[in-house]
Amino acid sequence: MTSLRSLAAGAAIVVLSAGLALAQENTPDDPRLFEPGKLTVSTSDPAYPPWVLDNDPASGQGFEAALVYALAAELGFAPEDVVWVDETFEAAIAPGRKNYDFSIQQISVTAERSEVATFSQVYYQPEKAVIALTDSPVGEATSFADLREARWGVAIGTTDLDYVENVLGIGNAAVYNDQVAVFLAMQAGQIDATVTALPTALYVTAVQVEGTSIVAILPPDEHDQGFGLLFEYGNPIVEWIDAGLTALKEAGTIDALIAEWLISDLDAPVIAE
């Protein structure tokens, strides 16, 4: 009888422990988080406007920084429980273990990347913009054929490079380690044009790189689904995070952040073919 009581008590403890663990899931104490009690997020260093202002994601200023804090609040985290870590773009999209819950740095969701990482739903789909020096003949282009006459430069590992090669059909683009190197090459006269997300292009041409302008808007790449949060492959918290993003969309929060940080009046020609 004593043995039966002991077994029953032990079973009750196991059930209770399992119930407590289950109850903690989808809360800030979720044991599946990289650090339970914290929402650990990576972004690039430096991080650029309009995605992050002053290279300070903890300020919550800039579209992606503000989105993370809105998402954290929706999930039940206090602002001080959001932890930022640095991660290069190339390291974020590479396969392997991640020392954070997710990365946010304008990472496009593609079939190839989804083979080695797991993505949230798309939170933003930007248009593509062609950037060139203000007096560049690229500004006179009216077709993809015209654009193919230019010398192109693009950052390695990006969907911008995929776009130049696979949509515009340019096979000899110069490839650089990052966008800073791309624009230095443009100012040095080594390349004529580059392509990037429209919000980035707006900031680059207005503030960051003197003498450049947006000379054309391009159609979307059917293989680029838009920006998503990137998780270690198979991370079980994705469904919970997705529920938070859905709630923000339904409340109009993401649209409001887009209007605040990313929308600008722009008069540039559209080149579609």
Image (tube, rainbow, N blue to C red):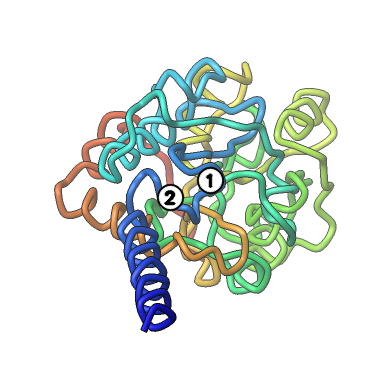
Q: Earlier in the sequence, mark 1 or mark 2?
A: 1
As rendered, which of 12 and 184 lies closer to the eye?
12
Q: What element carries label 1?
A: loop
- What residue occupies the far left of the structure in this picture? 251
Local crowd at mark 1 within 10 Å, few (<14), some, or many (≥20)? many
As rendered, which of 174 and 148 lies closer to the eye?
174
Q: Nearer the viewer, mark 1 or mark 2?
A: 1
Q: What element carries label 2?
A: loop
Q: Quadrant of the N terminus?
A: bottom left
Q: In this view, does 10 lie to the left or right of 23?
A: right
**Residue at the (38%, 55%) spot, across then down:** 241
- What residue occupies the far front of the structure in this picture? 1
| Residue marked by disc 1 | 106
Identify residue type, mark 2.
Answer: Pro
| Residue marked by disc 2 | 126
**Residue at the (48%, 26%) spot, across then down:** 52
Question: Where 161 sits versus 137, above or below?
Answer: below
Q: Is residue 176 left or right of residue 198?
A: right
Q: Position of residue 268 (x, y in %)?
A: 42, 40
Identify residue type, mark 1.
Answer: Gln
Distance, label 1 to label 2, CA atoms, is: 10 Å
Question: Where 1 sits versus 169, above or below?
Answer: below
Determine the image quadrant of residue 167. Answer: bottom right
Q: Where is residue 47 in the image (x, y as percent from the top left)?
A: 59, 28
Q: In this view, does 63 lie to the left or right of 217?
A: left
